[in-house]
Image (tube, grey):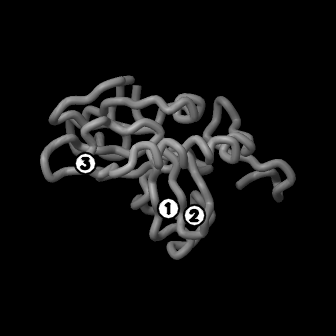
């Protein structure tokens, strides 16, 4: 399975995965497999919520390398065109925002790795993730597409 095939219900339940990058072509969409634990050298993909500068919350996937001196290096956010890396060309158009609406942003993991040096308070991350879930679930996500709809919005689309 590829990262962009990860379903929102799996993110909402807080699943984690390991990623495999075999070449540079894999950067935007690596192979992933579900994981409950990680070891040194693994690349982890974590269910998360991304809070933009404007206060909006979005389902996210945080990609981290577990090597000394390394950390989170990619953040994927669910947009109207599916999972997009936050630094990708076209990201702002896909989320319907300007750069100042997005940056700076914070990422809160559903379940962090026990030895993750970047997460100083795992309970806080989990609490913020759990707190955002009801609001994220209020948005209607079409199950077999990458479109996200809000009831009552113009054309129903976000």
- Image depth: mark 3 or mark 1 in front: 3
Say which label, 3 or 1, has the lower sequence index: 1
10 Å neighbourhood of mark 1: few (<14), some, or many (≥20)? few
Residue 51 image position (x, y, % from top left): 54, 58
Distance between mark 3 and mark 1 Cα atoms? 31 Å
Residue at left offset 40%, top offset 25%: 1
Distance between mark 2 and mark 1 Cα atoms? 5 Å
- Asked whether the viewer can see residue 25, the reply is no
Q: Return the residue nearer the eye: 55 or 34.
A: 55
Residue position marked by numbered label 3 in the rendering: 117
Residue at left offset 52%, top offset 34%: 11
Residue position marked by numbered label 2 in the rendering: 93
Q: Return the residue nearer the eye: 137 or 146.
A: 137
Residue 40 image position (x, y, % from top left): 16, 34
Say which label, 3 or 2, has the lower sequence index: 2
Distance between mark 3 and mark 2 Cα atoms? 33 Å
Residue 131 image position (x, y, % from top left): 62, 46
Q: Residue furthest left?
A: 68
């Amino acid at each position: 399975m590829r990262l962009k095939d990860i379903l929102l219900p799996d993110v909402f339940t807080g699943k984690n995965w390991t990623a495999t990058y075999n070449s540079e072509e894999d950067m935007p969409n690596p192979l992933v497999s579900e994981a409950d634990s990680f070891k040194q050298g693994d690349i982890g993909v974590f269910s998360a919520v991304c809070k933009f500068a404007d206060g909006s919350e979005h389902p996210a996937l945080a990609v981290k390398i577990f090597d000394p001196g390394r950390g989170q290096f990619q953040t994927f956010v669910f947009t109207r065109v599916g999972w997009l890396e936050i630094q990708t060309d076209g990201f702002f158009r896909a989320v319907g925002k300007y750069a100042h609406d997005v940056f700076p942003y914070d990422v809160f993991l559903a379940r962090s790795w026990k030895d993750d040096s970047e997460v100083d308070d795992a309970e806080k991350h989990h609490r913020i993730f759990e707190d955002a879930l009801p609001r994220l679930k209020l948005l209607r996500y079409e199950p077999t597409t990458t479109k996200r709809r809000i009831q009552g919005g113009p054309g129903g689309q976000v």
